[in-house]
Image (tube, rainbow, N blue to C red):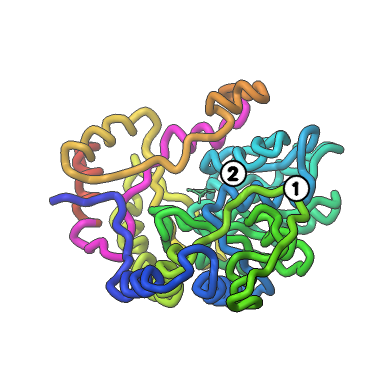
Amino acid sequence: MEVPFYRHSVNKDDIARVVSTLEGMFLTTGGVTTEFECKFADLFEVNHCIGTTNCTSAAELALRIWDVGPGDEVIVPTMSYVATAQSVALRGAKPVFVDSDGQTGLIDLNQIEAAITENTKVIMPVHLYGVMVDMVALKVIADKHGLKILEDSAHAVVSSRDGIKPGQMSDAAVFSFYATKNITSGEGGALICNDDKFAEDFRRGTCCGVTKTAHSRRKEGEKAYVGYDSVQVAGKCNMTNIQASLLIGQIDRLPMDRAKRGELVALYRKLLADFGPVELPHAPDGIDSSHYVMVALLQDGTRDGIFRTFGEKGIGCAVNFDPIHLKTIFKQLSGYKEGDFPVAENWGRRCITLPLYNGLEEEQVRYVTDTIKAAYGK
Ligand SMILES: Cc1ncc(COP(=O)(O)O)c(C=O)c1O
């Protein structure tokens, strides 16, 4: 049996929507992008959504609009994908890492205040694997120190905690539609927020700071040429109609997709329950997870053997994540070293991400867990 690590669930209707876009005039940002943005903002009950080319650019642009730059610090968990810290480093600011909670892998809220200095501008929590950080508790800390919150919600497209969703208790939240995410356009991203002025600056910031996009100029001027100004320093990271076409149908299927993932996660948890060499992250009360990935923690020192066995048995897997502070660039930039964040380092040595997606069959889940148990001689 083969068990690929991931399969997307783009269907015939999604493909038809892309074809229809390709047959139309606007391949870049246009009406389909607006349709996606309205749908996505509604999902989180927020005022604004702006589509982007990816999550990393969206995070960097949000920080740029808040004027985060050299000399400033942004608090991030070390247990995340490098993009979280890279969006800060791209601004010339310093990502200040915080260790993980040993039960969930999430940023340890009890260690955030000790990391705050007079240079801290923003806290960037990560809703790891789709399990949201306690935003009520985090907002208390942020308000006490006058800090902004930017939620890295790359894993949390359909998550909530105590009924609170991304974007509802922060200044903004950013999302990824990278190839393996719950919904995908290969690459893609979005920012959501409630503040009108910030949304306007961010939208302009996705498109060279221009006051009128090609689409709005075309609509206003019909056939006559309409000019534009550029009013802020900005690069380009606007979502295209092609990306948006792929995403619209997937948004509608999110509840169904999450339910299926939830069933598969429950099966994994049942089959691996009380199996000594494998520990599963704790799911706190009040969490409605997107079930972005199925992570297990293996007995320390045994993971390379499991990688080899999976390779032989045709099972795909991944690592989410190696702690960011140990990546070469962050050791070089800020002098972080092994031993700085022991909980995340332990997690990073032991974690393995098992196959999880809508089309995964129950018998494939059993094959994965049987393979793990056999590898430990059980
Ligand atoms: C936690 C987290 N943040 C940010 C990103 C970056 O997303 P993108 O690839 O869309 O820039 C990822 C991507 O995998 C991620 O897992």
- Please tell me whether residue 10 is drawn above or below residue 143 in the rendered image: below
Q: Quadrant of residue 8?
A: bottom left
**Assess mark 2: CB under 8 A from ligand 1?**
yes
- Please tell me whether residue 361 is drawn above or below residue 282 in the rendered image: below
User: In terms of depth relative to the viewer, which is nearer, 328 or 10?
Assistant: 10
- Sort mark 2 into few (<14), some (14-19) or many (20+) by Cα contacts within 10 Å: many
Judge whether residue 17 is colored magenta: no
Which of marks 1 and 2 precedes in the sequence?
Answer: 2
- Quarter that holds the C terminus: top left
Q: Quadrant of residue 257?
A: bottom left
- Sort mark 1 into few (<14), some (14-19) or many (20+) by Cα contacts within 10 Å: many
Secondary structure under the numbered disc 1 in the rendered image: strand
Which residue appears at 62% of the width and 42% of the height?
87
**Which residue is the extreme one toward the front?**
224
User: In terms of depth relative to the viewer, which is nearer, 23 or 364?
Assistant: 23
Image side of residue 87 versus residue 116, left or right: left
Q: Which residue is mark 2?
A: 84
Percent across and percent down for residue 192 are 64, 65
User: What label does residue 122 carry, if any?
Assistant: 1
Image side of residue 334 versus residue 56, left or right: right
- Please tell me whether residue 223 is drawn above or below residue 124 in the rendered image: below
